[in-house]
Amino acid sequence: MARLFLARLMKPFRWRNPRSTARMLLDFAKAERSSFYDMMEAANATGDLKRKAQYVSHAVDEARHAKMFTLRALELDPSRAADPSLFHADFEHLFTRLGEAKFISFVHLGEKRGRTQMAMFRDELQALEGTKRADTRTKALLDAVMRDEMSHESYSLVLSKELGGSLVGARAWELKRGWLRAGALITGLIYTLLMSVLYLLLFPLALLEKMKAKGAG
Amino acid sequence: MSAILGISANYHDSAAALVIDGQLIAAMQEERFSRIKNDPALPLAAARACLAQAKVDPRALDEVVFYENPYGKLERVLLSMLRTFPRSLRQFPRALASQLGGKLWVLDALSSGLGVPRERVTHREHHASHAASAYFASPFERAAILTVDAVGEDTSTALWLGEGRTLTCKERIAFPHSLGLLYSALTAYLGFEVNEGEYKVMGLAAFGQPKFRAEFEKLVRLQSDGGFTLGLEYFDSHTNTEVGFSKTLEALLGPRRMPGTPWKLDGAEIPAADQRAADVAATLQAVLEDALLGLARRARAVTGVDALCLAGGVGLNAVANARLFREAGFTEFFVQPAAGDAGGALGAALLAAAEKSEPRTKFTHAAWGTGVSGATAQSIAEGLGLKTRRVDSVLDATAERLLRGEVVAWVQGRFEWGPRALGQRSLLSLPTPLAVKERLNRVIKRREPFRPFAPMVLTPRAGELFGAFAPRLATFMTTVAEVKPEARAKLEAVTHVDGTARLQTVEPDTLVGQLLERIGRETGTPVLLNTSLNGQGEPIVATEADALAFFLAHPVDGLIIDDVQIDR
Ligand SMILES: [Fe+2]
Ligand SMILES: [Fe+2]
Ligand SMILES: [Fe+2]
């Protein structure tokens, strides 16, 4: 819920210029793409043919969403077309790591949160209609995507119950992951700082190596 | 029984290959499982799939062989950081983290990830793995082998002699002087993604003239003995992950092309920037070919043998391969389809098998992946609300649709090893009219309009339609041939702007061969347009589920998986 809270806090800064909207839509696209990877892994890994079909259909929706968000983002900010990470996204192998029951409970939570956030953004855009900051096409895009998200949210809940998954358990796992990620971020920053210092301390060695290279060449 | 698993990973396009008693059983790239194109992650899914194919338990493996020396690479990265002090300040923490945070411990990670005792996990050398992937997969008893890529541990180019079960390194060229690096840097300069856009550069070259020879002489100096050196001030390559060019290169060749800039190469008026880019690509292609030719002539002089094998990422340049075959003076030539780093997995396993004096393997096709089942495909498709029908004759059903001018997604047998679809996971159509190319490029694959599509042709009939080509390369689509002028009208959708085609020859006794025969009977031309079955930016499909996901997302006319025909 921290993310939603943060999103709410940032409201005054949203929809001010097309470039920041584009950046936000590209973040959405990344999340959609990650979800595509996870759903395809689920489709290929589950032994149940009926669920295979459900996961494939879900994956195809997410790939389409990713494409739609990316295209809209590039309309708003064509300079992002040069971004080499445009088609990249994380893949955490959630199905393999969590097992099917926990995985689908986790999917349900993610879908629900995603949809809530999109609904919030959509309402903000609705309120801006007719003003200078109106963005009717992005609003329509969110409408189109949210319709699919609603169905993802409901089928995953049904499956989670069917498979005996626990939403509380999935939530706990999610919190733990968030905690670990924050930790990794901080460690990463400290590491980069220390390594840069180490690098500068290497100066005498670099000098030697350069002299050697010159002598050899 | 001896079972050896080869692994390549951590740089680009990871893969696993299983060799039992010397014979190749399975070889697969991780990207087909993770669905992340060129996935460099530890290929545990691919490894497990290889083992499952042979029903071998990982604990029964005699050896797991990693394709390069993980420690040698760290040394090179550190050295190059020191040499480029202090410019490499920003790369240093990242490069060190990528080495320490996994690459260095890859052997331990393989041991724990696969459940194989650590002492059975070994490694070979990067270029030895490349050399083995070509030579031990070839039918030759004696051959010269060239391995040419961006960089291995510290080698970028090597010349080997293969005799029976032994490989001997004769000469090498050390990083940073590297043809792979040159090609990558120019790929980035032309606005394409490195390790991905190299094919685009090759396709683009056909639209230009090598007008930048003088400038390129500063980038790479070719020596009379086949060696070469790069003008290092034009490149900017601190680590294996940072392949790039410097501002000096832009000063020499003009400003870089920004990625994503649309192309306008057809039509009467070609924008100057597009033409210049094509001319740069054409010069790069010509210079690369000259360099390879120099290396090949050197290889012939040093070894005195008649057969040549080529491996390393540069071996995927089909246009250069065609020129090598014509001009290098070898009578026999072989390039294995996964010539790039994925192929290292195959090479490492074959090399270890050769050391154990196992009999050499047969490598006559590329179908070393996992298979598909019609029954599974049908169930999933019905769950997705699609129309399905099991057909008595896949050939009849497919031929009928193709002859109607449809674009058919075709999924049969085990998926291909290497970056090319060779008739197991393909999009097929007739090779005419030209409109089909437009439809495929713009709607289905969303590629740059200048990229050509490739033909598959029945081997015994290839001579009627195409000029001379290296037969062992055409099996795996690693070469091009001239389309005979009288055949061009019939093959307009698969003929590149320079009148060539990257053909695949298919034996008549295979399923695709029979399909081509059927098409030939009706149209007089046993040729189909064949392009890989994948969406933009995605790896080629592997499973039934992947194929159905593709079908739902792309406007192709029909999907055939095994004996099941699927329609919307
Ligand atoms: Fe979505
Ligand atoms: Fe969703
Ligand atoms: Fe390599």
Image (cartoon, rainbow, N blue to C red):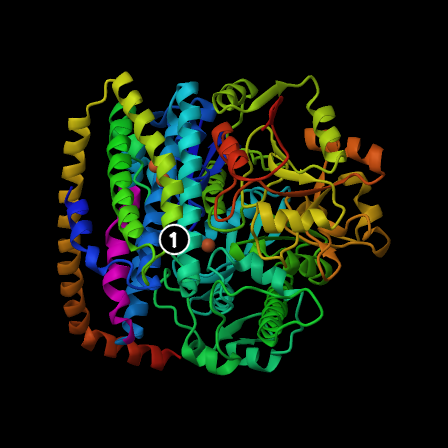
Picture quadrant where residue B450 is located? bottom right
Q: Which residue is mark 1?
A: A136
- Chain ID of residue with mark 1: A
Q: Look at the magenta stretch and give its main secondary structure.
A: helix
Q: Answer with the quadrant where ligand 2 appears in the image.
A: top left
The secondary element bearing badge 1 is classed as: helix
Residue B463, position as x, y percentages in the image = 82, 47
**Residue B562 left/right relative to B179:** right
Residue, far front: A130
Image position of B445 with respect to B361: above or below: below
Dot 1: few (<14), some (14–19), or many (≥20) neighbours within 10 Å?
A: some
Please check the rendered image and state whether residue B88 is part of the magenta-colored stretch, yes or no: yes
Which span of residues is magenta-colored?
A: B87-108
Residue A196 in view: yes
Quarter of the picture holding the N terminus of chain B: top left
Residue at left 32%, top 35%? Answer: B120
* Quadrant for the C terminus of chain B in the image: top right
Residue A43 locus on image (x, y percent): 41, 28
Q: Residue at x 68, y 64 (%)?
A: B266
Horizontal relation, residue B215 to residue B76: left or right: right
> Label 1 sits on what residue type?
Thr
Residue placed at 76% from the left, 47% from the top? B433
**Residue nearer the viewer, B486 or A69:** A69
